[in-house]
């Protein structure tokens, strides 16, 4: 509840400090006295955008501070979500600087207007003629019925499940898109993979293939050169082997004359041995040497295939081709495995949908059960408020799709007079009727949920006599469960308050100031007497005022 309000340098207010208590608080004052200024200042605390023109002295800072007792509001989770320090005595402060910039604080922590609005919605509800239109909106109508149906936990669970369901839907759609994209590439990837697989890349030794190709392609030249080399080695007298043997014989004769000569002899012997081996290998190669056009063609074809693959895939070695082949194979596997993933996800979606249906059905049944109770209570209250022929109908129809709070379509229908037909509430109820309907609904809600403090701004406009008296009774009854303020012009309502404040203006040095004062019992009698009979207070007005207060 709102426990105190401090306004400084705002509109016609120099500085105002006032404390409030629980129960039914009345605020009265002549037209133009500044009640709207009080509401304007309170609206700033609740998150309304600031305007430098609202500052009384533009050279000084405007400060509006409100203190709320939130011990019974169960808001610790919200404070955690907003990353704020929780305190049962929560202080909200707005400042408008001379520069025109504004700042907001909750328990001395700077906050955005968005976060301020998120919290203030739980603290105080300013009910004005404009806000009365809220009762015609779908969200509010659901809020009313679900409060009576005690659906809050059910809707929270449904909302969580709906989020999971939508996540599954999104994942399934992504899988299907991925499959569609892979299918477009599947045939081409399959062709590329087959092309890379057929060449059996793991067995390819490019250097060996190229060497074999060169050997087969140049067999005649190789044979000719091998024969020539052998002839050079074996030629009589001038052959290399004969020359080596002659050198060996000469060096053998002097080998005993020293280590250096022995070493030379050994080296020439080694060369002779090596040349003998070379001759043997040349003979062996000559014997094996043969033309094989088919083998040459096969190797040439294989080399062309590999080089074409290098060019096609813009790589330089066989290892890179293997990596490309493996990556393509994975894509093919993904395409084939996506069917299983899609089938699994579709099954998950069916189960999630079935769970949603069951949860939505429970929410629907709870709503359907309380609608007759709500309509009966509402019509009874409206009858007491001077609308005896008012009839309500709440239509609840299932939808074919899920929405954030189930799968229902809800509509409030209203008939003000006998002989007329039901129509949408926003089309069939006047402003005065909507005010009384909203009051009746909030009085019903007060029996089911913890409502924030509520301030009724001249909800009694256009009513008088017994109806206003009944309005006062309803607000007083509501104040047993919550803090209720009423800004009123009617003495019948003003007399029912547990506390009474008066807004008034004073002129000091040709400057007008707005003030707010809590009235004593004697001052209340005078105020209500003036509301009954005007400025000139008569004895009968005083007596009537005392009677109302008693």
Image: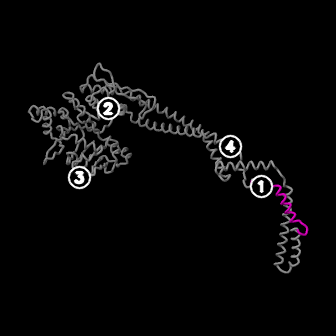
Q: Neighbour class for label 1 at 10 Å: few (<14), some, many (≥20)?
A: some
Give the label, 2 or 3, closer to the camera: 3
Give the SS element for disc 2. Answer: helix
Residue nearer the viewer, 396 or 47: 47
Q: Secondary structure at mark 3?
A: loop
What's the magenta region? 210-238
Disc 4 from disc 1: Cα separation: 29 Å
Q: Residue at x 25, y 44 (%)?
A: 41
* Cα distance in 3D space between marks 2 and 4: 69 Å
Q: Secondary structure at mark 4?
A: helix
**What x and y, as percent, mark residue 206?**
72, 53
- Reading the image, the residue beneath label 2 is 135
Q: Residue furthest left?
A: 539
Q: Which mark is residue 214?
A: 1
Q: Residue furthest right?
A: 236
**Magenta stretch contains residue 192:** no
The reply to whether the C-beta atoms of the residues labelled 3 and 1 are less than 8 Å apart is no
Residue most toward the top?
A: 419
What residue is drawn where x is 32% and y is 48%? 87
Along the polypeptide, which appears first: circle 1 or circle 2? 2
- Whether residue 476 is visible, yes or no, is no
What distance separates the C-alpha of mark 4 from that of mark 3?
82 Å
Q: Relative to the observer, which residue lies in front, 427 or 243?
A: 243
Dot 3 or dot 1: first in sequence order is 3
Going from N to C along the chain, the mark reached first, 4 or 3, is: 3
| Residue beneath disc 4 | 194
């Amino acid at each position: 509840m709102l426990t105190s309000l401090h306004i400084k340098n705002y509109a016609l207010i120099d500085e105002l400090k006032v404390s409030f208590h629980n129960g039914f608080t009345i605020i009265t004052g002549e037209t133009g006295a500044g009640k709207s200024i009080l509401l304007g200042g309170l609206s700033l605390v609740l998150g309304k955008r600031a305007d430098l023109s609202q500052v009384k002295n533009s050279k000084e800072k405007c400060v509006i501070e409100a203190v709320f007792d939130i011990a019974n509001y169960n808001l610790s989770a919200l404070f955690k979500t907003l990353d704020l320090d929780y305190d049962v005595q929560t202080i909200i402060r707005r400042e408008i600087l001379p520069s025109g910039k504004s700042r907001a604080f909750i328990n001395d922590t700077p906050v955005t207007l968005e976060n301020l609005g998120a919290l203030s919605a739980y603290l105080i509800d300013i009910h004005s003629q404009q806000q009365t239109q809220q009762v015609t909106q779908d969200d509010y109508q659901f809020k009313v019925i679900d409060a009576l149906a005690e659906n809050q936990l059910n809707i929270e669970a449904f909302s969580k499940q709906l989020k999971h369901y939508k996540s599954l839907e999104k994942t399934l759609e992504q899988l299907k898109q991925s499959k569609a994209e892979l299918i477009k590439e599947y045939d081409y990837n399959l062709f590329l993979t087959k092309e890379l697989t057929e060449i059996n890349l793991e067995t390819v030794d490019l250097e060996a293939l190229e060497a074999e190709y060169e050997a087969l392609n140049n067999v005649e030249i190789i044979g000719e050169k091998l024969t020539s080399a052998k002839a050079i080695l074996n030629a009589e007298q001038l052959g290399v082997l004969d020359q080596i043997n002659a050198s060996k014989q000469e060096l053998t004769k002097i080998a005993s004359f020293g280590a250096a000569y022995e070493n030379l002899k050994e080296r020439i012997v080694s060369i002779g041995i090596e040349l003998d081996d070379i001759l043997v290998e040349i003979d062996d190669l000559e014997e094996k040497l043969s033309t094989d056009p088919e083998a040459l063609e096969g190797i040439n074809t294989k080399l062309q295939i590999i080089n074409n693959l290098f060019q096609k895939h813009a790589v330089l070695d066989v290892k890179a081709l293997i990596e490309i082949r493996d990556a393509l194979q994975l894509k093919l596997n993904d395409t084939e495995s996506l069917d299983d993933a899609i089938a699994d996800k579709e099954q998950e979606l069916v189960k999630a949908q079935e769970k949603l249906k069951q949860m939505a059905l429970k929410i629907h049944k709870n709503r359907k059960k309380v609608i007759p109770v709500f309509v009966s209570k509402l019509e009874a209250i409206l009858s007491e408020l001077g609308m005896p022929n008012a009839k309500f109908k709440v239509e609840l129809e299932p939808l074919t799709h899920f929405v954030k709070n189930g799968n229902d379509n809800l509509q409030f229908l209203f008939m003000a007079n006998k002989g007329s037909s039901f129509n949408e509430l926003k089309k069939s109820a006047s402003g005065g009727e909507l005010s009384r309907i909203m009051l009746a609904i909030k009085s019903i809600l007060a029996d089911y949920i913890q409502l924030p403090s509520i301030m009724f701004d001249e909800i009694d406009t256009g009513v008088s006599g017994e109806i206003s008296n009944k309005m006062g009774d309803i607000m007083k009854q509501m104040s047993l469960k919550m803090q209720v303020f009423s800004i009123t012009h009617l003495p019948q309502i003003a007399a029912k308050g547990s506390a009474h404040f008066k807004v008034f203006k004073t002129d000091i040095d040709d400057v007008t100031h707005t003030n707010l004062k809590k009235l004593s019992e004697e001052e209340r009698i005078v105020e209500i007497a003036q509301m009954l009979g005007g400025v000139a207070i008569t004895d009968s007005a005083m007596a009537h005022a005392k009677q109302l207060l008693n």
